[in-house]
Image (tube, rainbow, N blue to C red):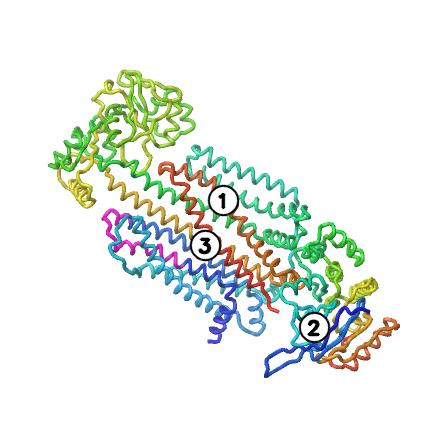
Amino acid sequence: MENILKVNKIEKYYGSRSSLTKAIDNLSFEVEKGEFVAIMGASGSGKTTLLNCISTIDKVTSGHIFVGGVDITKLKGNDLNKFRREELGFIFQDFNLLDTLTAYENIALALSIQNASVSEIEMKIKKVAEELDIKDVLNKYPYQMSGGQKQRVASARAIVTDPKLILADEPTGALDSKSSKMLLEKFNYLDELGATILMVTHDAFTASYARRVIFIKDGKIFKEIHKGKDSRKEFFDKIIDVVTLLGGDLNDAL
Amino acid sequence: MMLCKLSLKNIKKSIKDYAIYFFTLILGVAIFYVFNALDSQTVMMDVSSSTAELIDLMMTMLSGVSVFVSFILGFLIIYASRFLIKRRNKEFGIYLTLGMSKRKISLILFFETLFIGIISLLVGLGLGVLLSQVMSLVVANMFEANLTKFAFIFSSSACIKTIVYFSIMYLLVMIFNTYSVSKCKLIDLLNGAKKAEKIKLKNPYLCMIIFLISCLVLGRAYYIVTHDFLELQEVTDVIKPIIMGAVSTFFIFWSLSGLILRIVMSIKKFYYKGLNSFTLRQFSSKINTTVFSTTIICLMLFITICLLSACLTVKNSMNANIKELAPVDAMFTTNMNMDKYYDRFRNYGYNDDQIKNAHYTPKEMFKLFNFDVTAYFKDYIEVNTYATPDLTMNHTLGSKLDSIRTQFPFLAYDTMESIMKISDYNKVAKFYGIKEYSLNSDEYMIVADFKSMVNIRNIALENGEVINLFGHTLKPKYESCQDGFLEMSSQHINTGIILVPDNIIDEEYLMQSHLIGNYKTTDKEEITNIENNINELDKDPKASVYLLPSGSTQLAIKEATTGLSAMVTFIGLYLGVIFLISSAAILGLKELSESSDNKERFKMLRKIGTDEKMINKALFRQIAIFFILPLILALIHSIFGIMFAVKVLEVFGNEQLLPSIITTAIFIVIIYGGYFLITYSCSKSIIKERY
């Protein structure tokens, strides 16, 4: 299988020489095309830093990250923006929808900054709206939508450009359990359609929807488990086992 | 002391937000100082006593204007500081949760205002002193005075005045801040930033209807001030179109904010291109809430444009007019046969002796005072004007009187017309170097140059109204008034002189006798001496028995004109610049605070991979729209406003309109454009983010 994401021995340090914090300490993993990977870890484990580095919002101190064969740690300026615009899709905990635009316009923005034509925009949004079941809210503003709807609109914006990799940062963090479940089922659906999703979470229930879970502690990979042929419930139990093993404050799982 | 430190740090921290505020304060202080220090610049100049009097008058006017200006600046400062406080609600919320008392927060604000006040006053005064050095050149040029020596001028009185005025303003700001802090609630402070923005699209049909109605009302207002101009007799008549204009301006912005979005949204190719949808939504979400302030800014710009161009026109035209309208050195006039209209003249404040003795020409009258004025003249002429109760405007307008009277009910139709022999007038015209005329024995003509009167008289002349004078019937030679004048002046104020053939004049009706001449000397000082001597004659006891000839001399007219034009120019500049920086500063501050609010939005755009160039473009457009929109409407207003002003200022002439409009445009481009660029670059640095 083709490697979409290859993280190779990256390190990220914060602070000065006298008081050095290693947020990420020699971390490597790979994500294959079409995979749905969850990264779990407690607050301060380095999972958000990792996501920021992959999304080029932050820069690694050393090591390399390859997305679709391109070393993104070498990109600069507008190449970075171009990469983010064309290769990545983002889903944030707090949705990050523009409150002045309707759902439709929010999704369209991702395409229009790539200079897509009006007909292309219309067609793609129609398709993605059906997939994510948000046809009814397309003409609504964010303040008129529920949290779940907002997150699905944000997801639609993330996938409408057909990115190589979708990055989700605690996508269920601000949602109630019902909306979370609905969103995660949509993620599974997208996964079946062939999307590659990398999701960061500290919630075992959310992680149990992924096909593989990578646990991070103190900037290093602690453990990695695969769903294989397990049911979601069985996978959830396995995750809880690891969480128990991890201890600390990652025991707020469902 | 801790609070002091905190305030200083706050200022340093939010210097980006404060930059425009600071800049405006400094400019305000500097301008205030410069205009109040104008008189000190004239001290070292070589000016005559009458000019000095005019300068005194100008300074009185300017200090009156200063009070008005300080009101505007006071409002601006309070508005700006309220704005900046709002931006820091969260910070105050944190202080309060930490247990700081509201009194202490007020104290922090007090220190901040104090620091900002002191710094801006010092810097502003420094800048003002420098600027006033430049200004002294302008003043010297304006009064055509010789800059005898260049000296560094510092006006301590202006300095003290500036400090007092601005201290009062800052004190008011402090009181206002304390009040607003004491009123606020903790929960609002902490949640202030999180207000959910509701977007409501306006009904497009309603917008359309309101837009059309506003345009019609505005059009009507334009029409009133330009076409029905002569019907505007009273102040209330002028206020009506002003209110119409202001209200329709508001509704045009209101409806336009809805319409523009609707229209552009329907052009999908444009709307869904790059960040256009984002920019437009930003614009419309804001204009919903800022229609009122946009209106105010638009109106202030309008006033600025009209004020500046009108004042500059008056100044330029007045100076140009002198050469044309005061072509010779001096003209002296005595009233003749005053006893014929005894009662009237007594009402004017002349005594019985003066009225009885009013039978001498100026030359004879001066002789009575043992003063031979002709001795000073290189050449001179003597002419007479006549008047009779049998020829008033009631008669000259003839059959057109009634229709004209209904249109202009306030003209004095009973005033006797001035009548001149054609030969006398031609003598004057030859002396002045203006056009001479000829008449047949049964013809008359009217010379006039005051446009409004010319228009009225032309109605009658076109109709060929005949007049009856001293038993003769005369018909008009021309169908319109001809250009010409007798009295020297700095403006076109000749409302009309009836020229008739010499032979029909009855000397009984001699009204005034004029002596017009050029001095032998061209030296300004000598002329001043001669004229001072003439003025001294007033102290002669004979002056209570014999009425001294009244004089109007080129020198006096010139001095009055330069004084007046300088006054007009300085007041126009003062108010114009203050209005301009006030409106630009309000816009700038608003946009800057919007930019801080939009920081999150731009951050988001970056996260989804928008190019820096695209973001800057969007920001630029967003700010540009907000700066340009009120300017466009203000410009349209100004076209009609200036047309109106031109008519009001007709007497001054309006030949110099174009250069003043160009000067005004330069002012606006520099100040308004400058504010725009500063706002843009500050906004850019606010939304800029470092990874």
Three-letter amino acid code at disc 1?
A: Leu
Q: Counting other residues with Cα less than 10 Å from the Cα at mark 3, is it few (<14), some (14-19), or many (20 or more)?
A: many
The residue under the point 44% across, 56% down is B73
The residue stretch that appears in magenta? B29-54
Q: Are marks 3 and 2 in contact (CB under 8 Å)?
A: no
Give the spatial CA distance, label 3 vs label 2.
47 Å
Residue A48: give its label: 2
- Whether callout 2 and callout 1 share a subunit is answered no
Three-letter amino acid code at disc 2?
A: Thr
The residue under the point 67% across, 68% down is A56
Q: Can residue A254 be seen in this view?
A: no
B43 in the magenta segment: yes
Relative vertical location of residue A147 with respect to residue B402 in this rendering, above or below? below
Q: Counting other residues with Cα less than 10 Å from the Cα at mark 2, is it few (<14), some (14-19), or many (20 or more)?
A: some
Label 3: chain letter: B
Q: Magenta part mainly helix, strand or loop?
A: helix
Q: Mark 3 points at which residue?
A: B581
Q: In which quarter of the image is residue A100?
A: bottom right
Label 1: chain letter: B
Three-letter amino acid code at disc 3?
A: Ile
Q: Mark 1 points at which residue?
A: B635
